[in-house]
């Protein structure tokens, strides 16, 4: 039996069995429980790039590597950009950084994903740890806040099925329909909602004083902050009935509660403050470090592991990269021409970039624009290991198959190192052992992160004084445009721009359009056309376009979150015109 781990950028990091040419969910793994999602189920039938290509013509791999070497030599005195996405979550995917750091390329920093929220979590807690599934299993109440469990984290559906569920989401998601309470909050107003909840903890005097005294700092300043808003102002901002918010608080206040927060709440300028206010509300109730309790955002799955690959000396924020500035751009495991904000700017930049290289499995908007295309091996054809941001499992990804297609990230790195007189990488298995080290332990046959052996934060926090730091200031920069809020989130059959992408814009029934109409969506940043689908699940003030939909990012801002240097895809408004 051949066991491996799903390579895709996903909370679940499923354990996979590869048998008779088929991928199957590992029945013994506690969260995978024998099934895979549609994305991995279709992985092997997805057409992949078979041969390298230069200016549109297929070439041999040797020729492609020669061209790449020549162009890198020419570009060395100018700027070269090393741009890596998360198409494959394996740690050895970063091996290419070893070459590009030594060569002197500009790297990217910040995030397209969870960075704003993470900055807020780190300010309060020092490090972001997710909750082990055993702890979630021990809670009675589960609050799912801006995370679309049934789509993006589907193996947690089983875990929460017997819990009292509170869903906080502007969309009536599949999970919201099953929940005891759905707070269909106005988009972008989770900060107001968390503040309102905290305000009522204070009014009702139901704080956990023992926890606050022992494990936290800045509580008095925090109280000043939450008292600086009126209840009416906060309630109005959320667009909710105060009664419903209070019902949520009454459910939570005396029960072991897990709060699963997703990236949906933080795709805004003030994303860091949203996470920090949610954490502060939870800390008031003493929900950290206790059985069955906690706030689980995207955890730092690599906590305690060694970073073995060098980073570049120079870097630029990933969300606002200007490809036009570089003599050479090396793009690996990413589709910036679809996934980066403000697509028109990205495409103009790629067209102006003197020489662009795409190193990826599939054809997409970026592969079509690049001068040189190099296919990699897929995850079954190379050695790797992965962490997870949803659980504390570590997944081994051994090489299970030979293939004549593509080149692995490690081999490509070694070929470039040889051409430039840079020290080659150690053996793959040695690198994996160096990364994993003794930071793992085994339980029931599966590797886990040692850092999570104890309930996260039960010994204190990861800040300098080991205390949780309440939020005491709040900064915001609201998009002043008019029109609908844009919700752009994940969909079941695609993994961002990989696999089966959606093509629609989803509108609430109150709008002036009908199913099948063709509309032009316009924002401050650009415009794009879509076919309409009407959805009863949306608020009257919101439209939805899934991640990966061709055109969606023509509408999104090329600006950064106030903290965390993250993309802020939903910090915009949308106006519609019939085409
Ligand atoms: N099938 C599938 N799974 C995936 C992915 C995929 O593309 N497809 N992508 C993976 C990646 S890269 C990531 S980062 C994760 C992300 O997965 P999630 O954390 O679930 O993130 P999203 O799907 O972007 O948004 C989650 C929810 O937030 C809601 N939301 C939007 N705006 C707001 C708001 O202002 N407030 C609140 N409270 N909610 C809001 C949306 O309606 C949505 O239901 O999923 C991973 N898993
Ligand atoms: N509008 C909107 N935009 C978004 C988001 C959103 O919710 N809405 N989500 C954002 C988020 S959370 C994220 S994480 C980013 C994701 O953005 P990207 O990281 O660009 O992700 P993908 O679109 O999945 O593209 C990954 C590419 O990796 C390649 N690949 C797969 N496996 C391998 C491999 O083994 N080796 C190599 N070399 N390449 C491989 C595939 O060809 C694929 O095209 O997008 C962001 N953009
Ligand atoms: S649910 Fe996530 S980890 Fe599991 S198979 Fe699907 S993409 Fe991979
Ligand atoms: Mo992501």
Image (tube, helix red, strand yellow):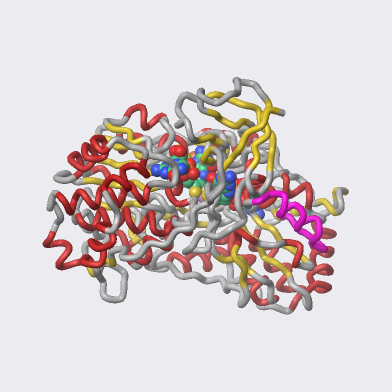
- 355 in the magenta segment: yes
Quadrant of residue 309 in the image?
A: bottom right
| Quarter containing the C terminus | top right
Q: Position of residue 28 (x, y in %)?
A: 36, 40
Q: Is residue 400 visible?
A: no
Residue drawn at 73 percent across, 55 percent down? 358
Q: Would residue 295 be found to the left or right of residue 76 on screen?
A: left
Quadrant of residue 158 in the image?
A: top left
Residue drawn at 66 percent across, 32 percent down? 577
Q: Position of residue 100 (x, y in %)?
A: 67, 71
Residue drawn at 61 percent across, 48 percent down? 556
Residue drawn at 21 percent across, 44 percent down? 138
Q: Would residue 445 be found to the left or right of residue 98 on screen?
A: left
- 265 in the magenta segment: no
Q: Position of residue 148 (x, y in %)?
A: 43, 39
Quadrant of residue 471 in the image?
A: bottom left
Q: Would residue 86 be found to the left or right of residue 224 on screen?
A: right
Q: Please give the range of residues in magenta.
A: 342-358
Q: Is residue 366 visible?
A: yes
Taking depth in this image into account, of 375 and 344 the one nearest to the observer is 344
Q: Position of residue 460 (x, y in %)?
A: 23, 67
Q: Would residue 480 be found to the left or right of residue 81 on screen?
A: left
Q: Is residue 208 above or below residue 460?
A: above
Q: Is residue 28 above or below residue 208?
A: above
């Amino acid at each position: 039996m051949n066991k491996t781990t799903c390579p895709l950028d996903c909370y679940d990091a499923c354990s996979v069995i590869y048998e008779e040419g088929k991928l199957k969910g590992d029945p013994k793994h506690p969260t995978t429980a024998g099934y895979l999602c549609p994305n991995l189920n279709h992985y092997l039938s997805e057409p992949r790039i078979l041969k390298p290509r230069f200016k549109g013509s297929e070439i041999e791999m040797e020729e492609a590597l020669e061209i790449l070497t020549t162009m890198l030599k020419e570009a060395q005195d100018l700027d070269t950009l090393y741009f890596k996405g998360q198409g494959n979550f394996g740690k050895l995917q970063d091996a290419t950084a070893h070459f590009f750091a030594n060569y002197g390329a500009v790297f990217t920093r910040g995030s397209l994903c969870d960075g704003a929220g993470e900055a807020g979590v780190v300010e309060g807690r020092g490090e972001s740890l997710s909750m082990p599934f055993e702890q979630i299993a021990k809670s009675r109440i589960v609050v799912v806040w801006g995370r679309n469990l049934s789509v993006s984290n589907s193996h947690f559906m089983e875990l929460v099925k017997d819990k009292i569920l509170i869903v906080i989401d502007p969309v009536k998601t599949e999970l919201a329909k099953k929940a005891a309470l759905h707070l269909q909050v106005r988009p972008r107003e989770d900060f107001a909602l968390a503040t309102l909840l905290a305000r009522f903890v204070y009014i009702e005097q139901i704080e956990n004083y023992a926890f606050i005294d022992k494990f936290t700092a800045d509580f008095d300043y925090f109280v000043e902050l939450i008292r600086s808003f009126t209840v009416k102002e906060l309630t109005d901002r959320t667009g909710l009935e105060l009664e419903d918010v209070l019902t949520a608080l009454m459910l939570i206040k005396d029960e072991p509660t897990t709060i699963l927060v997703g990236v949906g709440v933080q795709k805004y300028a003030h994303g860091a403050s949203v996470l920090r206010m949610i954490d502060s509300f939870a800390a008031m109730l003493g929900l950290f470090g206790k059985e069955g309790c906690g706030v689980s955002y995207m955890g730092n799955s690599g906590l305690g592991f060694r970073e073995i690959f060098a980073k570049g000396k120079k870097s630029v924020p990933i969300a606002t990269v200007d490809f036009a500035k570089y003599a050479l751009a090396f793009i690996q495991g990413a589709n910036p021409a679809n996934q980066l904000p403000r697509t028109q700017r990205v495409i103009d930049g790629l067209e102006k970039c003197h020489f662009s290289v795409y190193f990826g499995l599939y054809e997409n908007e970026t592969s079509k624009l690049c001068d040189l295309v190099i296919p990699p091996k897929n995850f079954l054809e190379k050695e790797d290991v992965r962490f997870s941001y949803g659980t504390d499992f570590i997944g081994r990804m051994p090489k299970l198959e030979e293939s004549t297609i593509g080149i692995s990230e490690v081999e490509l790195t070694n070929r470039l190192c040889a051409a430039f007189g840079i020290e080659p990488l150690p053996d793959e298995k040695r690198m994996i052992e160096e990364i994993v080290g003794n930071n793992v332990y085994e339980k029931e046959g599966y590797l886990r992160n040692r850092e999570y052996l104890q309930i996260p934060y039960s010994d204190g926090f990861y800040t300098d004084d080991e205390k949780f730091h309440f939020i005491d200031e709040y900064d915001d920069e609201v998009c002043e445009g008019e029109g609908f809020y844009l919700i752009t989130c994940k969909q079941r059959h695609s993994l961002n721009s990989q696999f089966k992408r959606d093509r629609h814009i989803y509108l609430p029934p109150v709008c002036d359009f009908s199913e099948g109409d063709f509309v032009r969506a316009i924002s401050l940043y650009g415009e794009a056309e879509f076919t309409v689908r009407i959805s009863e699940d949306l608020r009257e003030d919101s439209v939805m376009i899934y991640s990966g939909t061709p055109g969606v990012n023509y509408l999104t801002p090329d600006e950064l979150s106030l903290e965390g240097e993250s993309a802020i895809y939903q910090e915009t408004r949308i106006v519609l015109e019939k085409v």
